[in-house]
Structure formats: C-alpha cells, structure tokens
Image: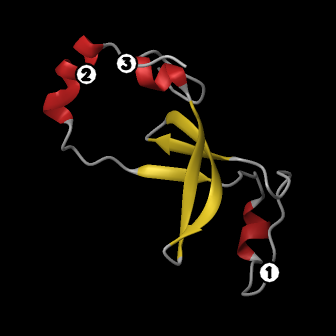
C-alpha cells in the first residue's frame, strides 16, 4: 500500500475542513428510456454484479476504495476493504478523469 508523503499532507492540510461528497456505487446499468418510463413501484431492476461483491467508494470521480456493506448502530454502512493507492498519493487512479 502506498501512503501519502508527509509534505503532501502538510500542503493539503489547509483543505482538511472542506466537505466533499462520498458516493458508494452498488452497480451500474445502461437501460433504455422506454424501460425507465415503464418503471412502477415494486419493479425489480437486476444488475450483473453478484450479491456479496465489494462496492466502490468514490469521492467525486476519484475511486477511493472498495468496501463491504455492514450495519452499524442500526444504520446502513460500509467497511473499507481496500484502498486505491493512486487516490492517496495524488496520481490519477482507476475511475478518474485526470
């Protein structure tokens, strides 16, 4: 695992209180507009991803980590199972637009 260099941590410390959106992606699917318009309450949308697979955690467009679903204090949560080193050292990583 690659950890951020100390000088990088000092340079970004000024931004440490900036709020950023964190997104957990379960799966993604492309479908037609007509299929979307036919959706009704109770309909099921199936994905190709097997149940139990890890989820992806994104900060913006940057893939930060993989995670598993857990329940924490009666709330849905995720446990980080793997960090994406390029996301930590400032390099472009998988899922980035850089």
User: Residue placed at 38% from the left, 50% from the top?
Assistant: 21
Q: Could you give the CA–CA distance between mark 2 and mark 1, rounded to whole angstroms?
A: 47 Å
Mark 3, residue position: 4
Which numbered disc covers residue 43?
A: 1
Check the image and tell me how it is coloured.
secondary structure
Give neighbour class at mark 1: few <14, some 14-19, many 20+ (Cα, 10 Å): few
Disc 2 vs disc 1: Cβ atoms closer than 8 Å? no
User: Residue placed at 53% from the left, 78% from the top?
Assistant: 74
Q: Could you give the CA–CA distance between mark 3 and mark 2, rounded to whole angstroms?
A: 7 Å
Q: Position of residue 60 (x, y in %)?
A: 43, 41
Q: Quadrant of the N terminus?
A: top right
| Label 3: element kind | loop
For this rendering, which residue is in front, 37 or 18? Answer: 18
Say whether residue 46 is left or right of residue 28. Answer: right
Say whether residue 36 is left or right of residue 66. Answer: right
| Label 1: element kind | loop
Say whether residue 46 is left or right of residue 5. Answer: right
Q: Position of residue 69 (x, y in %)?
A: 64, 59
Disc 3 vs disc 2: Cβ atoms closer than 8 Å? yes
Question: Closer to us: mark 3 or mark 1?
Answer: 3
The mark that comes first in sequence, 3 or 2, is 3
Which numbered disc covers residue 34?
A: none
Which numbered disc covers residue 9?
A: 2
Q: Position of residue 2 (x, y in %)?
A: 49, 16
Question: Closer to us: mark 2 or mark 1?
Answer: 2
Q: Could you give the CA–CA distance between mark 3 and mark 1, rounded to whole angstroms?
A: 45 Å
User: Residue placed at 43% from the left, 24% from the top?
Assistant: 88
User: Residue placed at 84% from the left, 64% from the top?
Assistant: 46
Instruction: Give residue 80's quadrant in the image.
Output: top right
Give neighbour class at mark 2: few <14, some 14-19, many 20+ (Cα, 10 Å): few
């Amino acid at each position: 695992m690659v950890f951020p260099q100390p000088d990088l941590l000092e340079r970004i410390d000024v931004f440490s209180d900036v709020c950023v959106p964190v997104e957990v992606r379960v799966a993604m699917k492309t479908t037609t507009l007509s299929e979307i318009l036919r959706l009704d309450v109770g309909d099921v949308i199936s994905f190709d991803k097997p149940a139990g697979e890890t989820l992806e955690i994104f900060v913006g467009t940057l893939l930060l980590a993989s995670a598993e679903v857990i329940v924490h204090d009666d709330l849905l949560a995720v446990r980080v199972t793997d960090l994406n080193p390029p996301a930590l050292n400032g390099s472009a990583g998988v899922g980035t637009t850089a």
